[in-house]
């Protein structure tokens, strides 16, 4: 497994001569456990909504181990393992009532699955909607009847509107700038509000749908940042070694926020929090407290180096 983000941090800890060896060894052991954590993300949506293309845009699937879960002999859910990350690519719904029933049961089983410690396996669910399609009956049924009844925490649910470039028949997508014109932005914002209001009225949960284009690599950074912020802070760093390293994937976003800088800040903060938690298991608390200030600059440099493809560096 590529643990490049950890290498300079561990090197810094190992060469620090001011710490009690017992403390240092416990911290390094705890870090080893952090490195082996798994993060499970499930992608769901109607047929043709672009689940696989979204996964390929965000993540480095070229090095993924591909398999099937939960029960390989019967399941249609494809699973990608990339370092700490496990991505569940569920089959699309909407082709036929028979298949929909089968696939819905498989998605429900995945949401109910538990790890070896008895904890629910899925950390985050991304439900994808086709931005070019006005008929969203299948999407709403998926959310209301399959996802929400079985997800452990509805705060771990993201509604992502893909193919925003094809909305309004693609007439207002600016191919020169690779972004939506004002008319299309307005339409997509209204669509997002409509989806949010429908879900709120139907099942009384609050969501903040975002729109993007996996094909044109638009708002991919915004989607990733949204995913990061929903996860527990001490697990957000697990994305780091699994992301798509091509700079062009992350270049084009709306201008509401500098998403790429915020992604790096979130991952640095997550890594620091995880390290702080690891340090609390050490023997001599007075000496272990000095370790986090020591590695702080190293964490920032490591995150900036590993995520250099995002452009810009954090302090």
Image (cartoon, helix red, strand yellow):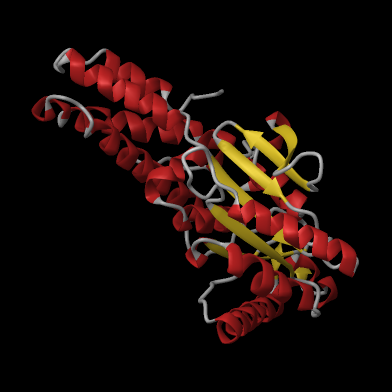
Position of 60 with respect to 152 (left or right) is right
Position of 123 with respect to 30 (left or right) is right
Q: Name the spot of residue 303 as percent of width and height, x first.
A: 43, 35
Q: In which quadrant is the C terminus drawn?
A: top left
Q: Name the spot of residue 260 as percent of width and height, x first.
A: 50, 50
Image height of 304 relative to 129, above or below? above
Position of 285 with respect to 256 (left or right) is left
Residue at coordinates 87% horizontally, 61% vertically from top-left? 99
**In front: 107, or 304?**
107
Q: Name the spot of residue 39 as percent of width and height, x first.
A: 53, 42
Image height of 244 relative to 190, above or below? above
Residue at coordinates 15% horizontally, 16% vertically from top-left? 20
Number of callouts in the render?
Answer: 0
Q: In which quadrant is the N terminus drawn?
A: top right
Q: Is residue 210 among what the camera can see?
A: no
Q: Name the spot of residue 50 as percent of width and height, x first.
A: 77, 57
Residue at coordinates 19% horizontally, 13% vertically from top-left? 21
Going by the picture, which residue comes out furthest to the left?
A: 286
**In front: 216, or 7?**
7
Going by the picture, which residue comes out furthest to the bottom?
A: 201
**In front: 249, or 7?**
7
- Dividing the picture into quadrants, the one containing residue 296 is top left
Residue at coordinates 70% horizontally, 36% vertically from top-left? 61
Position of 259 with respect to 147 (left or right) is left
Q: Is residue 90 among what the camera can see?
A: yes
């Amino acid at each position: 497994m590529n643990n490049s983000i950890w290498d300079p941090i561990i090197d810094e800890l190992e060469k620090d001569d001011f710490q009690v060896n017992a403390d240092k060894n416990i911290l390094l052991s705890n870090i080893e456990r952090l490195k082996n954590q798994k993060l499970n993300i499930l992608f769901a949506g109607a047929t043709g909504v672009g689940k696989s293309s979204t996964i390929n845009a965000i993540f480095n699937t070229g090095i993924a181990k591909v398999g099937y879960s939960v029960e390989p002999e019967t399941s249609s859910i494809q699973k990608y393992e990339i370092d700490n990350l496990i991505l569940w690519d569920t089959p699309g719904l909407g082709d036929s009532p028979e298949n929909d029933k089968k696939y819905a049961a498989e998605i429900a089983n995945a949401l109910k699955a538990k790890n070896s410690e008895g904890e629910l396996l899925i950390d985050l669910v991304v439900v994808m909607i086709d931005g070019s399609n006005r008929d969203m009956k299948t999407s709403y049924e998926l959310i209301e009847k399959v996802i929400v009844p079985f997800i452990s925490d509805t705060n771990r649910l993201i509604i992502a509107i893909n193919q925003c470039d094809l909305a309004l028949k693609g007439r207002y997508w600016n191919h020169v700038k690779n972004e939506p014109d004002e008319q299309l932005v307005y339409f997509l914002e209204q669509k997002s509000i409509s989806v949010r209001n429908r879900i709120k009225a139907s099942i009384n949960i609050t969501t903040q749908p975002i729109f993007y284009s996996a094909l044109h690599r638009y708002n991919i950074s915004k989607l990733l940042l949204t995913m990061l912020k929903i996860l527990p802070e001490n697990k957000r760093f697990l994305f780091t070694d699994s992301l798509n390293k091509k700079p062009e994937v992350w270049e084009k976003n709306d201008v509401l926020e500098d998403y790429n800088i915020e992604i790096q800040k979130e991952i640095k903060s997550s890594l620091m929090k995880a390290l702080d938690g690891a340090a609390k298991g050490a023997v001599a608390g007075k000496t272990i407290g000095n370790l986090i200030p020591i590695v702080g600059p190293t964490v920032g440099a490591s995150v900036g180096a590993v995520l250099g493809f995002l452009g810009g560096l954090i302090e």
